[in-house]
Amino acid sequence: MRKPPVLAIVVPCYNEEEVLPITCGLFKAELDDLLAKGKVAPGSHVLFVNDGSRDRTWEIIRELAASEPAYRGCSLSRNRGHQNALLGGLMEARGHCDATISIDCDGQDDIATMEQMVDAYLDGCDVVYGVRSSRETDTFFKRFTAQSFYRLLESMGVECVYNHADYRLLGAAALDGLSQFREVNLFLRGMVPLVGFRSTSVYYERHERMAGSSHYPLSKMLALAVNGITSLSVRPIRLITWTGLAVALASLVAIVWVLAAHALGGTVSGWASTTAAVFFMGGVQMLSLGVIGEYVGKIYLESKHRPRWIMSERTWDEDEK
Ligand code: UDP
Ligand code: MG
């Protein structure tokens, strides 16, 4: 059995002025409960990461931090998206705690499940995945797209835990491991399994958002899916090779057929098949170029080694933390 960890609950927030005043107290209440049960150590805190919000989110975080030492906040210099904000927060917490739990700030992920995560950590796990046991509160469309998303990832050889998003506990060793991943295009739920260490899953019911609205419209979900696949798998490029091979073999058959038709006093008609073949090949080639281009673009962006986020403010003094 490990000793109780100093826990940091890391919460990325983007334009969440409506929901933050409701959920902040819930995180604190959970932390107090864990402290009272002796499952986490004094010094445990909630770290809110402001992802360049345009509303009062950062003001609210600052007020919270001024009112209560268990609340801390840091702010990215601009909006960098959920994945960057989350990793930015985790890297801020790293070195100052024994474990982190990352959770969205809208109350959708069941806060009480943190206790099971901490129990698993105390039992020796370094990574604990929060897995949604049901998606009843999600619309049919969201459930369908989410399911297709995990299936697609799996078929592309990306290892990730089904129905797990970014609600998870990471121990200090896993955080150190994660800090060595230097990629700019982040897809944390695919990267964490690559970090390794002993892991387990805990299950929870997903709730409705407590206030405000989702920042993940279909377009952003699609972008996340494409990023997840192209960041972690080269299988789409292999698929192009196989498609090319299949088309080449099919065209060999077509050539034999064309030659035979010619030898047997072939006809001039054939406009439809020629046009169809040209369109088909054009389509396949454009699609293949697009897929390759996606990877080339990614190499280009990765090769710049730009910072993934810039932290502009913290509510604590670095020396006294
Ligand atoms: N978020 C963020 N930066 C963004 C978009 C979202 O930090 O650019 C945060 C947001 O405040 C929330 C979490 O990421 O805590 C998940 O976002 P949301 O609840 O909108 O997504 P959904 O649950 O609908 O997939
Ligand atoms: Mg949400």
Image: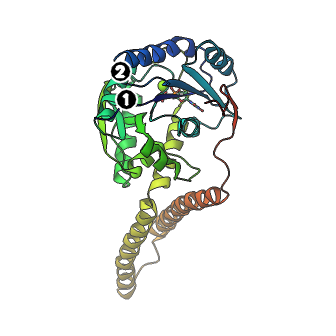
Q: How many marks?
A: 2
**Residue 208 visible in the displayed image:** no
Q: Quadrant of residue 4?
A: top left
Which dot marks residue 4? 1
**For the residues bearing labels 1 and 2, Cβ distance under 8 angstroms:** yes
Give the crowd class for mark 2: few <14, some 14-19, many >=20 residues within 10 Å.
Answer: few
The quadrant in which the N terminus is found is top left
Give the crowd class for mark 1: few <14, some 14-19, many >=20 residues within 10 Å.
Answer: some
Q: Amino acid at mark 2?
A: Gly
Rendered-image quarter of ligand 1: top right
**Residue at disc 1, secondary structure:** loop
Q: Is 50 placed left or right of 175 in the picture?
A: right
Name the residue that disc number 2 marks.
38
The quadrant in which the C terminus is found is top right
Residue 210 on image: x %, y %: 48, 14
Residue 155 on image: x %, y %: 34, 52
Please give the name of the residue rendered at 35% of the width and 36% of the height, measured from the top-left corner: 129
**Residue 69 visible in the displayed image:** yes
Residue 145 on image: x %, y %: 40, 36
**Residue at disc 2, secondary structure:** loop
Q: Image height check: is 39 above or below 83?
A: above
Residue at mark 2: C-beta within 8 A of ligand 1: no
Which dot marks residue 317? none
Q: Quadrant of residue 69?
A: top right
Q: Image height check: is 242 above or below 47?
A: below
Nearer to the camera, 103 or 175? 175
Q: Amino acid at mark 1?
A: Pro
Please give the name of the residue rendered at 37% of the width and 30% of the height, measured from the top-left corner: 143
Please give the name of the residue rendered at 40% of the width and 52% of the height, measured from the top-left corner: 194
Nearer to the camera, 23 or 248? 23
